[in-house]
């Protein structure tokens, strides 16, 4: 998700391919476990940024090859989104949430054989299964939490839950860097071969395994609690919608441009986060050790958390379209400064892009779906699929960095933000009725 990818997806996927009605649940304690879901899947998403440089070193990967972690994670939004919504309609919210949690747990446990085989493709498969579970949980997260209290406080609960998501994206990278990065090994994978290389990869990936085993245990606890409440929703029913009718919305210029902007925003945000560690480790930037650079990822996502509170106040006074254009322009300026500077200025100007990202997802989403009326759920589903920009833009960034440099590759997210700024200007006036 800025509204982290996880939080943004929750907003979109919650109503992605269906509308539902159900009775209110009289289970206040369950609120806390749903908040924990937002915290966990936000943190899991941002933890990729810490693991990418680790896998890059272990398997001596190019930037493009390392970015395949994000490809296999975010492509799940396109592959699983619609089938996942159908599964939730069949199982119901509570059982659907349990299915998602157990799938996430399975993805975490797959890191064990991935480490034992010391094979990069196995890690990618584990990430895809993990992301499949994340998508399933996000499909039910928002509508589920809306049922866990009075209707008049729904917005407050959703905002509070998304704050937990941002907290997860801030906390997980910091502690993940301590646990996973900064190996005590005195050699690198590039210096080894054969059996020694395989043994090194297995040993060094144990830190990753331990982290995900802890997550698997936490997910098992949350799944158990949700299962206890599986029959507490009364009168739940789901209405079917036509995929063709939803796709027809792309013909509307405002919505089509907005969906493209979501694709580009998620792609740009994830691409920057994926390579921040490698960027900050460069001698001409901060020249930090891997672990110390990894800790600074929290500043990138923490800026998004702080920016959300600032943005919520600013958006009451400023046109959302113009505010979007302004922060996108700010992101472009920060990227230009970072690419053409050295030292602390280059490093911290890139980290500050997180602050610019803060309001982008919710603002693009609301502007694109404005006045869609009864077709809002269809529009939300398409935007959910557009989150797969996180699978496409990072590999493009990695390939460009391999061919040139990390600094030059910043031109790609800058171009994404330029198009987003254009959408803000395009959508600055109220939308026409659908």
Image (tube, helix red, strand yellow):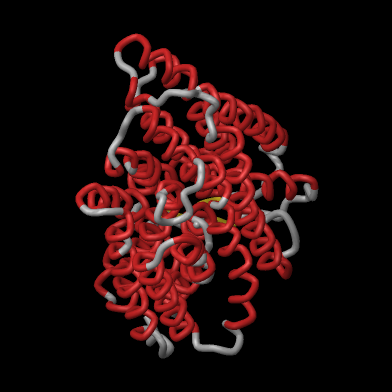
Which is more toward the observer, 262 or 192? 192
Left or right of 32: which side holds 405? left
Q: How many marks?
A: 0
Task: Residue at 40%, 59% (x, y): give it.
Answer: 266
Left or right of 87: which side holds 340? left
Task: Kindly tell me whether residue 137 is visible in this rendering.
Answer: yes
Task: Residue at 33%, 68% (x, y): give it.
Answer: 414
Q: Is residue 340 above or below residue 216?
A: below
Q: Is residue 38 above or below residue 381?
A: above
Q: Is residue 31 above or below residue 189?
A: below
Q: Is residue 92 above or below residue 428?
A: above
Q: Give percent across and percent down for residue 132.
A: 44, 38
User: Which quadrant of the rendered structure holds the C terminus?
Assistant: bottom left
Which is more toward the observer, 167 or 118? 118
Q: Quadrant of residue 121?
A: top left
Task: Kindly tell me whether residue 19 is visible in this rendering.
Answer: no
Task: Residue at 56%, 52% (x, y): give it.
Answer: 296
């Amino acid at each position: 998700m800025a509204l982290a990818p996880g939080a943004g997806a929750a907003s979109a996927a919650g109503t992605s391919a269906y509308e539902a009605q159900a009775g209110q649940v009289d289970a206040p304690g369950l609120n806390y476990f749903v908040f924990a879901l937002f915290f966990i899947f936000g943190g899991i998403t941002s933890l990729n940024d810490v693991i990418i440089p680790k896998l890059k070193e272990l398997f001596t990967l190019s930037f493009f090859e390392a970015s395949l972690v994000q490809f296999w994670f975010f492509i799940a939004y396109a592959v699983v989104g619609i089938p996942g919504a159908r599964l939730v309609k069949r199982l119901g919210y509570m059982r659907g949430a349990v299915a998602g949690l157990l799938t996430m747990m399975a993805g975490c446990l797959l890191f064990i054989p991935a480490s034992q085989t010391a094979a990069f493709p196995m890690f990618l498969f584990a990430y895809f299964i993990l992301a499949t579970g994340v998508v399933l949980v996000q499909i039910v997260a928002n509508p589920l939490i809306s049922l866990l209290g009075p209707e008049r406080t729904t917005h407050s609960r959703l905002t509070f839950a998304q704050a937990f998501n941002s907290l997860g994206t801030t906390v997980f990278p910091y502690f993940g860097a301590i646990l996973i990065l900064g190996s005590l090994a005195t050699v690198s994978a590039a210096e080894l071969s054969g059996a020694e290389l395989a043994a090194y990869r297995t040993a060094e990936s144990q830190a990753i395994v331990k982290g995900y085993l802890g997550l698997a245990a936490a997910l098992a606890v949350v799944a158990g609690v949700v299962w206890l409440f599986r029959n507490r929703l009364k009168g739940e029913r789901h209405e079917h919608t036509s995929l063709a009718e939803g796709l027809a919305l792309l013909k509307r210029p405002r919505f089509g441009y907005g969906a493209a902007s979501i694709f580009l925003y998620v792609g740009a945000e994830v691409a920057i986060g994926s390579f921040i560690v490698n960027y900050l480790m460069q001698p001409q930037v901060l020249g930090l050790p891997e672990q110390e650079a990894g800790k600074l990822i929290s500043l990138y996502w923490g800026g998004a958390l702080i920016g959300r509170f600032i943005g919520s106040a600013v958006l009451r006074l400023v046109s959302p379209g113009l505010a979007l254009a302004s922060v996108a322009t700010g992101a472009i300026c920060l990227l230009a400064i970072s690419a053409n500077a050295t030292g602390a200025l280059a490093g911290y100007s890139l980290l500050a892009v997180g602050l610019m990202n803060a309001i982008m997802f919710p603002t693009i989403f609301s502007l694109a779906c404005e006045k869609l009326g009864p077709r809002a759920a269809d529009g939300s589903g398409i935007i959910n699929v557009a989150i797969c920009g996180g699978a496409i833009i990072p590999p493009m960034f990695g390939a460009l960095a391999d061919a040139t440099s990390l600094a030059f590759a910043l031109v790609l997210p800058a171009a994404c933000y330029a198009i987003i700024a254009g959408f803000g200007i395009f959508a600055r006036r109220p939308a026409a009725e659908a």
